[in-house]
Amino acid sequence: MMRWVIGAVISLWVTCPALANNLDAAAVNDAARPAKQPATDKVTASVVKLQVLLDRAQFSPGEIDGKFGENAQKALKAFAEQNGFASDKTIAPELWDRLSAASEGAMIVEYKITDSDVKGPFLKELPSKLEDMKSLQALSYTSAREGLAEKFHMSEDLLRTLNPGKSFDKAGETIVVANVSAQRELPRIARLEVDKTGETLKAFDGSDRLVAFYPASIGSPDRPTPSGALKVTATNEKPTYHYNPEYKFHSVKSKKPFDVKPGPNNPVGAYWIGLSAQGYGIHGTAEPDKVSKSASHGCVRLTNWDVRRLGDNVKRGTPVVFLDAPTDSSSRQQEKSRGKRASH
């Protein structure tokens, strides 16, 4: 398997200029623990720092967007549980201190855009319909900015905010980005656990210790995620998406099977982990901002960077256990799923 090591292909500088709007590299790097629970819809320097720290610790907040939303809260709770701390929605001092102590280097660093970042080719527009994708030669990024945001696990909005007036399509331009290259190495994963109700995926090592956490989009009432235990059967970087008419997706009219070429905006993203139930897998997505916020067509969907990270550390035969919703909450989960837009 190919290991995606950001630090091997980029150059980073820690000295960063002050930026506008009170959200700059210095504000994030120097941010203290928030005294009260941050707002879920407001971008703050302390939450950007928290999300980078969680990402480095292998407790993914999904897309780093600077907001203390559901995914950041899930990741913080999982980290608290791993470290034996009581967990709630506040950022307790001991949690902040433990995360900070386990991580070295600035949260936000400078990055010089390379020729490969801007080379493309880029899509003019990503089709909204699956059938319109089958004629494309690749499901590429739509812009250099989209690629850069994904490279550093960030939302495009946060990347723009941290870099006012900057151009993202010029090689040699210096921007500031999340320093996710300082990520802790994962041990070999012995077991995966998919929580259908919590919409999370957890990874355990050989001693049954929780070593990684990821928010996930999981199933829908019309195409539910499997139950019980499966196994990893394969991993595939740059997968081709194969549409089968038996899937009977409401948005697809074709009565014949067709393929969609690989690329980060492929319906199953940039990486696929095959499971021992036909047609099911753990895969990436073209919409990292919607992970755990929209239903899938039965598979387990992570961000592209999270599924690649996971795939690099699992092997064939790794057990994948699916935890079903408790009886008393099954109706609530179904209602929640109906309110989500299904994706692949």
Image (tube, helix red, strand yellow):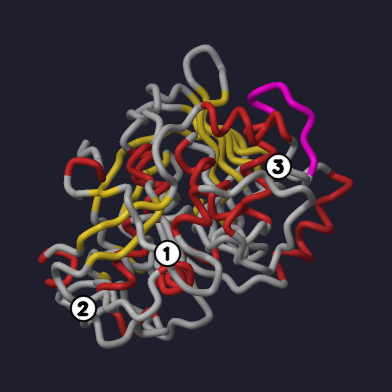
**Extent of the magenta region:** 81-88
Which residue in the rendered view is the most extreme toward the top? 207
Quadrant where the image shows the N terminus: top left
Amino acid at pointer 2 = Phe
Which image quarter: residue 32?
top right
Front label number (2 vs 3): 2
Precedes in sequence: disc 2 or disc 1: 1
Q: Amino acid at mark 1?
A: Ala
Residue denoted by label 2: 122
Q: Nearer the viewer, mark 2 or mark 1?
A: 1
- Alpha-carbon span between mark 2 and mark 1: 31 Å
Residue 224: percent from left, percent from top:
61, 56
Among the two numbered marks 3 and 1 on one chain, the one whose residue lies closer to the N terminus = 1
Circle 2 sits in a helix, a strand or a loop, which is it?
loop
Residue at 41%, 84% in the rendered image: 129
Q: Is residue 83 magenta?
A: yes
Q: Is residue 234 left or right of residue 116?
A: right
Residue at position x 35%, y 52% in the image: 109
Q: Secondary structure at mark 1?
A: loop
Find the distance from the CA under tag 3 to the CA under tag 1: 48 Å
Task: Identify which residue, 23 or 201, lies in the foreground.
Answer: 23
In this rendering, the label closer to the viewer, 3 or 1: 1
User: Residue 74: within the magenta?
Assistant: no
Q: Position of residue 88 (x, y in %)?
A: 80, 41
Amino acid type for the residue under numbered disc 3? Asp
Residue at image mark 1: 18
Closer to us: 290 or 104 = 104
Q: Is residue 97 above or below residue 32?
A: above
Residue 257 visible? The answer is: yes
